[in-house]
Image: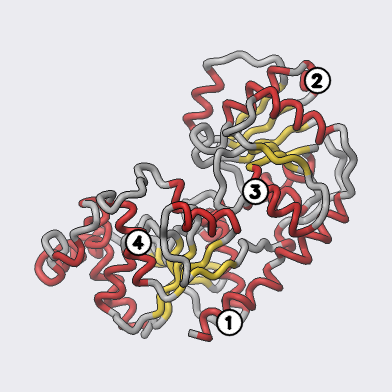
Amino acid sequence: MVGRASLSLGGKATGGISKHIDDLSIKLTENNFEVIIWDFTLKKSYSKSNVRIEGLNYTDIILGLIYSIFSLNIIFNKSYQYLSLKDKFLISTQSWKLKNYIIEKDINLVHVHSLNRPITHFLKLKFSNIKIFITDHGFWQKKGLVLSDNNSIFKKIKKNIELATSIITISSFANAQFKIYKLPTHKNINIPNPIFLSKIPIKEVHKENIIFFNGFNRSLEIKNFELVIKALKHLSFFENYKLVAIVNNEAKTFIKSIGVNFQIEILGAQPWEVVVDLYNKSKILVVPSKSESFGLVYLESLSVGTPIVGFHETVKEFQNKIDLDIGETFNSELENYKDLANKIESVLTRKYDKHQIRKKIQSKYDWDFSIKKYINLYNCL
């Protein structure tokens, strides 16, 4: 796996991608795969939960830079000219240890998490027979991306698609983005992000008057935290509710600059046990994102039967798949904070059978069913 290790595996990453890498890695080890997570942001190597995590120490980085200058010539090599200077540097620092590690372990399959990672080209140039699977976790949300052959990010995404064995997309909305950006789709295979229901226990606890916002990454820019505040300020109905929000530092600074007429508790990144507890205690999850590649937090909330208000394409897809009322959709391009307030109130005044919702989610999105799709994909090509 090429990606970042989650907090639960001893890494530093939070959010849906690292959680997905964590779950996929553990599930593969249960099916007799040897799994290594290549996390170049870490300065250590270790094993946890039968998964090997490889980082780069300072010696690895220095040797990589020397190797890239005198052997790969990445800076001036025409094969790499479409990459930005930052991407070339990232490849350089990883090159020495990654090359030796693949040879030593005789690795023949690499699963890269994100079409925005530059390492795919290096892998294919050095190991032409290696299978490379890339999971797209929302390429269109990358800052600076423009549909233009002169855009370095766009060129990198196109090149990664060209070099990959297969591209795994995680939602119908994600598939649609390939067509919007005029990218080839013949390698695309859709596997929705599964979840470990065993790691998300449904608790028989009293539902408190909590509105939960779980949007740590890009809280203001993508997850629309500011709009949630405006919505809750808009109606006196929410005076008896408490907003509990997991947000980044930018959002924390924002909330300090304004006043609110309801209870609020602002949190940073939290241990998984705390997040699960909040899903269970809350009456609703509200994350009215401007865009979602999949919407893992929605699925986590629904796993304990807590309804949601969220990005219209994602909620609609979940609702259609399980054929059940799970909350409300929200389209930030067409709707405003008043619409959001009305939808939150509507969900809070409806009744939901949490056990029925969980049963439906389990039948469509549990890892026990989905892991077979990954194994078949790895083995058939």
Q: Secondary structure at mark 3?
A: helix
At 37% from the left and 63% from the top, the residue drawn is 55
At 42% from the left and 76% from the top, the residue drawn is 165
Of marks 4 and 3, which one's residue comes earlier in the chain? 4
Instruction: Give the CA separation, mark 4 to mark 3.
Output: 29 Å
Residue 212 in view (yes/no) = yes
Front residue of 198/283: it is 283
Instruction: Give the CA separation, mark 3 to mark 1.
Output: 27 Å
Label 1 neighbourhood size at 10 Å, few (<14), some (14-19), many (20+)? few
Front residue of 311/117: it is 311
At 51% from the left and 71% from the top, the residue drawn is 51
Residue 112: x, y in percent? 43, 66
Residue under label 3, please give it.
Answer: 297
Label 4 neighbourhood size at 10 Å, few (<14), some (14-19), many (20+)? some
Label 1 amino acid? Answer: Asn
Front residue of 53/240: it is 240
At 75% from the left and 31% from the top, the residue drawn is 344
Residue under label 4, please give it.
Answer: 158
Q: Quadrant of the N terminus?
A: bottom left
Residue under label 1, please give it.
Answer: 376
Of marks 3 and 1, which one's residue comes earlier in the chain? 3
**Of tags 4 and 1, which is closer to the observer?**
4
Q: Secondary structure at mark 1?
A: helix
